[in-house]
Amino acid sequence: MNSNTVREPRRWWILAALCLALLVLLIDNTVLNLAIPSLNQEMGATPSDIQWIIDAYVLAFAGLLLTAGSLSDKYGRRRFLVVGLVFFGGASLLAVLVTEPWQLIGARFLMGVGGSLVMPSTLSILMTVFAEEAERRKAMAVWSAVALVGMVSGPTLGGFLLEHYWWGSVFLLNVPIAAIAIVAALVLMPESRSPARRIDPVGVLLSIVGLTSAVYVIIEREWNIPVIAVAVVALAAFVLWERTREEPMMPLFLFANRNFSGASFSILLMSFGAGAVMLMLTQYLQFVLGYGEMQAGLAMLPYAVAAAIFNGVGAGLGKKLSNRVLVGAGLLFMAGGFAVMAVTTGYLPLLTGLVIMGIGGGLAGPSAYASLMGAIPVDHAGVGSAMNDTVQQVGMALSIAVLGSVLAGRYTSEMPAGLPHAARESIGGAHTLGFGEAAGQAFTSAMHLGSWVGAGFCVAAALLAVTVLRPAAPTPAAPEPAQVG
């Protein structure tokens, strides 16, 4: 750390406020899945409505991330964080008041807009507040731990709310948390922005169209040729346009940095693994082992606890070992956890796999984020953070698309041919029709195959990290310090 750098005295309180903002986004996403039966019964939402209630948020969030990150660098990261929380909290309140599925779809879209403004600001503000590399690594470990805890604790909290209240309670929960985070941001956080740059409206439009189209194709899991063509053309045009700009929205030179590009792809594959855990285990615990919503959520907490503990361990080891070693080792641990899940049944053996995966995620996560963000000049912190968030969203979406297809294909092939179509199509349908035992055996076989696929992706990510990441890469100094006011 430069001797002239002044430490922000409230930096750890600021981190707590950033983690609160992050937590409200992650809990909301995981809680919604549990509310689907209630939405079916109480609102009369069709399967198509449910799909759009989920997809509207994802499309708005993923499509606007890069734009929001770039604009936050120019106009102020705290400002975008606060505006995003206002959008998110206000849209959550609207979601509580709606009476029709189409209204909830609109509210979820607005929540996605708010989330896209909030998410990049959490990590970019962290970068500007924690100037010392050792402290920044610890702060990223806390940020990463909160992300995992939020993802896993959502089902527990959602199960409690749905057991005692109505479906709207899962959205109402967001409002007070967002309000507290807004007050904390205004009271604690200094404003920060990069040196003035011109807005790139063409780049903004191309990135939104390209990312939204690409994510739509992934989450729909079908070869929609016109949408694929739009995604390819828009993203290719975005790259070509940005290469001609003196002040590009997305500085493409970052991809020439092996730590940035290597960490980006490692995070994508790591997110694929985390998404696989949520996708398979929420169904396995409830439909095969017979756990209730809240019990299933509690059963997954050891994964989050192990990850949180080893986030701290990984932050400490980062002083002695390179990011390359920690990311590679963590991803191999995750692969080992998947392998345990692939050859066992029942909760206690599953618990062993979850803890091993948590250890791996805890070791790999902070080092991967530190490697990616350490390759980014501070004046591009917002768009760099948005890139980190985008690859995580794409990884999660790919996990649902690829593993969803693997699980569905194996499940259907393992079910007896004479059963009704609804029973052979989904384990939920089989339970409704009274074919729970056959469905449990078929889904267990499907989960074992899916676990081997997850293990393979984690091994590939480990090899990529070891091959591409550079050890002990110094954090580059920004050309000019970020303006703080």
Image (cartoon, helix red, strand yellow):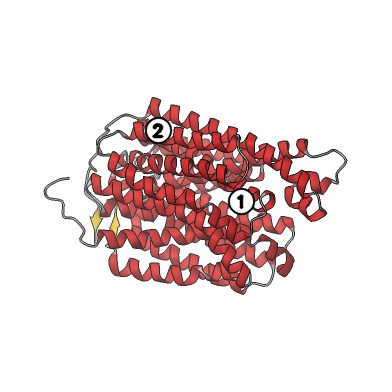
**CB atoms at circles 2 and 1 under 8 Å apart?**
no
Distance from disc 2 to disc 1, alpha carbons, whole Å, reads 27 Å
Residue 225 shows in the view: no
Q: Is residue 96 left or right of residue 328?
A: right
Q: Judge the density around disc 1: few (<14), some (14-19), many (≥20) Cα neighbours within 10 Å.
A: many
Q: Residue furthest top?
A: 467
Q: Position of residue 433 (x, y in %)?
A: 82, 53
As displayed, is residue 456 above or below residue 316? above
The residue under label 1 is 282
Residue toward you, 172 or 209: 172
Please name the residue shown 57% across and 63% down the image.
158
The residue under label 2 is 329
Q: Quadrant of the N terminus?
A: top left
Residue type (three-letter) at the residue carrying disc 1: Thr
Please name the residue shown 57% across and 66% down the image.
160
Q: Earlier in the sequence, mark 2 or mark 1?
A: 1
As displayed, is residue 473 above or below residue 401? above
Q: Position of residue 155 (x, y in %)?
A: 56, 58
Q: Which mark is residue 290?
A: none
Residue 104 shows in the view: yes
- The mark total stands at 2
Q: Position of residue 447 (x, y in %)?
A: 64, 39
Q: Quadrant of residue 211?
A: top right
Q: Position of residue 456 (x, y in %)?
A: 54, 30
As displayed, is residue 13 above or below residue 447? below
Secondary structure under tag 1 reads helix
